[in-house]
Image (tube, coloured by chain):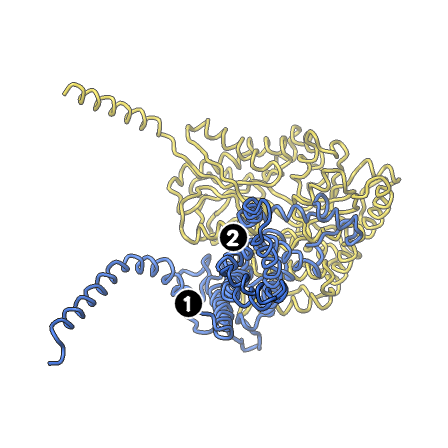
Chain colours: A yellow, B blue
Amino acid sequence: MKKALALITVTAACALANSAHAAGVTLTFACDSVGSGYNECQKGANAWAKKTGNTVKLVQVPKETDQRLALYQQQLGARASDVDVYMIDVVWPGLISQHLLDLSKYIPQSEVAQHFPAIVKNNTVNGKLVGMPFFTDAGVLYYRTDLLAKYGYKSAPKTWDELAEMAKKIQDGERKANSKFVGFVFQGKNYEGLTCDALEWISSFGGGSIVDASGKVTINNPQAVAALKAAQGFVGSIAPSAVTTYGEEEARNVWQAGNAAFMRNWPYAYAAGQAEGSAVKGKIGVAALPAGKGGKPAATLGGWQLAVNAYSKHPKEAADLVRYMTGAQEQKRRAIEASYNPTIASLYKDQGVLKAVPFFGSLYNVFTNAVARPATITGSKYNQVSDAFSTAVYSVLTKKAQPEAALSSLQSQINRIKGRGW
Amino acid sequence: MTTTPRARRTRSLAATRARTALWLLLPTLIVLAAVAGYPLLRTIYLSFTEYNINTDAAPKWIGLGNYWFTTEDGVGLGVLQIPEWWQSVWNTVKFTGVSVLLETVLGLGLALILNSKIRARGLLRTAILVPWAIPTVVSAQMWNWMYNDSFGILSEWGQKLGVLQNGQSFISNPDTALWALVAVDVWKTTPFMALLLLAGLQSIPSDMYEAADVDGANRWTQFWRLTLPLLTPAMLVALIFRTLDALRVFDMPYIVKGNAPEVMTMSMYARQEMIQNAQFGLGSAVSILIFLVIMIFTVIYVTSLRVKFD
C-alpha cells in the first residue's frame, strides 16, 4: 500500500513538473534553405524562443520556390496544421491567401506601417493582411572588380551589349589559364527563377511585363523579341550552354568558385560570396542590371513574407514569432550578417547596415522601383502563366524555338489560360 | 429427386467453404477498396469537375470539359487540345521504347553470363543488384551531379573527348537530354531485368541441353532454338513490368533534369497541372488519360503476345 502511494506521488510530481515544463508551445516553422537562409532563420527563431520560453522547430524546405509552393499547396489544401509559420514568396499571396491567417489582428498597425507600403499592399488580399514582409529582393548584377580592372574597364556595364562585349573579352583572356571560366551566369532552368530573369530582359528592352495592369496579354511585341534574341545570343557564347540547367544556387556555385565574370542573382549571394573560403571574397562588385536598347534597367521584384497557417493550433504564438522575425531588430541583424534586404525603409539609412552592405544605399532605387511579376492581375492563375512564360523562354534559350514564333504561341497560350478572364 | 443426400452434403460443404473464404478475404477486399478503389473512383469523379484547391471551395461538375472544351473564341482548353500534353506523351513513348529495348538486350546478356558456371557467381549476382537497390531519389541526384557541366565527371569526359563543348552537358542539350535520361534508366533497371531473366533461365531443365548436345546442336543453335523460346514467358512478364514502369516514370527525370519540354513525361505533366498549378480537376483528367494509355499498352501486350498469367 505504501509502495503504491509512493508511486502515485512520484507520478503526480512528474506530471506536474512536465506540465510546468510544457507551458511554452512548440511551433513548426518552414523558412528558408537558399544560401545561408536556414542558419539565419534558426538564429532568429532561437532568439525568439529564448525570449518567450517557446520552442521552434525549423523544417528543411526545398531550394526552389516552385517546389516549395507545390509542397505548401498540398499541405494547405488538406487543411493540415503541421506547419505553423510559412515563409511565402512575393507572388504567392494571391494564390494561397484563403489558407492564411489575417495578421492585422495580431500585429499593431504602427508596426505594419514601418514596412514598404507597396509590399504591404501586395500582401493584403481582400482586406486581409496574409503576410508580414520579411525581406525584399530584386535582381542585381554581380561583377568581379579585379577582372574588370585587369581588362581595363572602369565601371560595370550599362547595357546588355556592353555586358556581352566585356564578358567575351574577359572570358577569352581567362580561359587561357582556366578552361572552366565563363563570362556570365544566370538562372536559365525552366522554373520560376527563369521567369524573373526573362522579365528583367524584356522589361529592360521596354517590352512590358507579360500581362498589363488591365489584364491584356502584351507579351508578343518587338521589344520582347529583341530582348529574347539578345539572351539567346548569350547562351553558348558568354554563358555556358548548361546555363539552361542552372537555378540560383548552381549559378552561385560557379561564381563563388571564381569561374565567372558576371552573375545575375539576388542580394543574398553577396554575403555568401564574402564568406570565409569563398574564392571571390573581396572581389565582388554589385550594380543595377544593364538596360536594353532604348530601355532602362529593370530588376524583378522578389522577396519573402512570413505568414501564419490559418489551421495552426497556436495562432497567437505563431503571429508573435512572425512579429519578432519581421521586426526592425531582427531585420537589421539579417541585413548586417547575411545581406538580406530589409523591408523597413528606415534601415536603409542605418549606419551599421550601410557599413556591412555598402551596395544597399546605392541600389536603393533599384529595390524600390523593381518590376513586379503579373501575380496580382492573374490571381490564382499566376502559376500557369509563369510556367507557360518560362517554358517559352527556355525553348528560345535552348534554340529549340525562335523568339518570334515562341512569343506568338506564348500569347495564344496565355490567352487560353486566361479563358473567360483572370 | 435426383440429388442424393451425399451430393447435397458435398454441395453445402462447398458452399460453406466458399462462405468462409469470402469472410477471410473480406478484410483484404476492404483494405483494397479503401487504398485503391476509393482514390481511383475519386480521381475519375474529379476529372469531370473544375476544382482548384486554392480558390474553389468545392469541385464543380463540368462533364467532359477537362478533356475537350472549346470556348466561343475557338480556344481549346481541354487536355486533348493542349500541345504540351501530346509532347509529353511522345516523350514518354520514346523514352519507354528505347529504354526497355536496351534493358532487355543488356539484361539478357547479363543473365546469360550469370547463369553460366563462372567463378564468384554469387558475388557477381549480388553486385549487379546494387543500382537497383539504391533508392531512385539518391541515384538520380548522383547522376544529376555526374552530368553537371562544371564539376560532373560525365561532362568532363565528354569535354575531354570533344563530344561536348566547354560549359555543355549531356542534359543541357535538348537533343541529347532524353537519351541522357534513358542512360540513367538503363543503368538503374537492367539489373532488375537480368534478375527476372535469370530466374527464367534457371527454370529450364539442364537435361534439355544435354539432349541438344547429343543431337549435335552448337551453342548458337541451342540459344536460338532452345533457350530463347523457353525463356519467352519469363521475358514477356519482365517486358510488361518494365514497360508499365517506364510509362509512369516521374522521379528520375524530374530530379536529374527538372521541368523541361524536351523531357516532360506524362507523369511530370500530371504533377505540373495537379500539384504545381493546383488544378485538381484538370490534373485528374491527365491522370485518367495516363491510366488509359497504360491500359492500352497492357491490352496490346497481353492479347498480341498471348501472355498467360496462370
From this view, report whether residue B269 is shown above or below residue A172: below
Which residue is identified by label 2? A70
Callouts 1 and 2 in the same chain: no
Chain identity of mark 1: B
Furthest-bottom residue in this view? B1
Q: Amino acid type of disc 1?
A: Ile
Query: Quadrant of the image for the C terminus of chain A?
Result: bottom right
Q: Residue at x 77, y 42 (%)?
A: A260
**Element type at marker 2?**
helix
Q: Position of residue A365 (x, y in %)?
A: 69, 44
Depth check: give the residue in front, A68 or B245: B245
Depth check: give the residue in front, A155 or A32: A32
Which residue is identified by label 1? B44
Furthest-right residue in this view? A152
From this view, report whether residue A346 is shown above or below residue A262: above
Query: Quadrant of the image for the N terminus of chain A?
Result: top left
**Element type at marker 1?**
helix
State the CA–CA distance, disc 1 to disc 2. 22 Å
Nearer the observer, disc 1 or disc 2?
1
Residue A151: which quarter of the image?
A: top right
Q: Amino acid type of disc 2?
A: Ala
Q: Position of residue A318 (x, y in %)?
A: 43, 38
From this view, report whether residue A274 is shown above or below residue A388: above
From this view, report whether residue A189 is shown above or below residue A323: below
Q: Position of residue A150 (x, y in %)?
A: 87, 37
Depth check: give the residue in front, A228 or A204: A228
Residue A232: which quarter of the image?
A: bottom right
Q: Going by the image, does A408 lie left or right of B9?
A: right
Does the image show residue A380?
no
Chain identity of mark 2: A
